[in-house]
Image: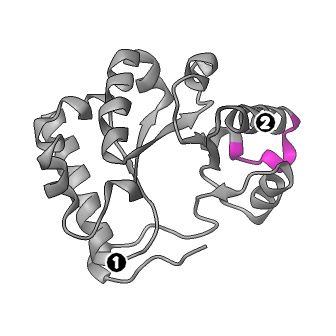
Amino acid sequence: MVDELERACRRQGFKNWQIFGVLGRLFVNTVPSTVRDTSFTGRGVIDYLGPTLSPRLVTLEITEREVIENLSLYREATHAFTEMGFTFAIDDLGAGYSGLETVATLGASYLKIDMGLVRDIHLKHVNRQVVRAILEMGTGVGASVIAEGIETEEEAKALMDLGIRFGQGYYFARPIDPSAKTAPPRQ
């Protein structure tokens, strides 16, 4: 049932994006086995996206743990999906797994720093050092770095002072019900 749940969540994410009608990039959490989902390959992926969403505007997020456990599957996914125009993000970077060298060589377009490193970063010297290192790694491999889980102005300011240009979290906006048909604020 996990594959069916994954498929349903992915499909609903694309529908919700179209309901909002937001211009910009859509980030969708998924697992490496997405590459083997026949309903999400070839022509099937176009049916998923609908008439208004291009693969060039979709980034598939895969957690660092999933990438490291399924390295060959991840590489297969990136090859097939990047040819269609999708980009990839390594999600939850720094969440306790040891694979930074592996992550650095995978060709992801985005590295998303886990909220555990972001929480109270303005008070934690070691976390700031780790974020600096991730930012330097991202720059070196040509990936944009995004901080996740920003909840306070102090965290946002500390991250900006470190050079982080992109962030997400409750500080910017809370999740909203797509049936309300109100687009989330653009930050």
Mark whose residue sits in front, 2 or 1: 1
Horizontal side of 99 relative to 154 (left or right) equals: left
**Residue annotated with mark 2:** 127
Quarter of the image for residue 14 reads bottom left
Horizontal side of 74 relative to 99 (left or right) equals: left
**Residue annotated with mark 1:** 21
> Which residue is rendered at x = 20% and y = 69% of the image?
51
Badge 1 element: loop
7, above or below 11, in the image? above
Dot 1, crowdedness within 10 Å: few (<14), some or many (≥20)? some
Q: Where is residue 18 in the image (x, y as percent from the top left)?
A: 28, 72
The amino acid on which the numbered mark 2 sits, given as a three-letter code, is Asn
Q: Which residues are drawn in magenta? A: 118-125
Asked if one can make out residue 21 in the rendered structure from this viewpoint, the answer is yes
As for residue 172 lying within the magenta part, the answer is no
Badge 2 element: helix
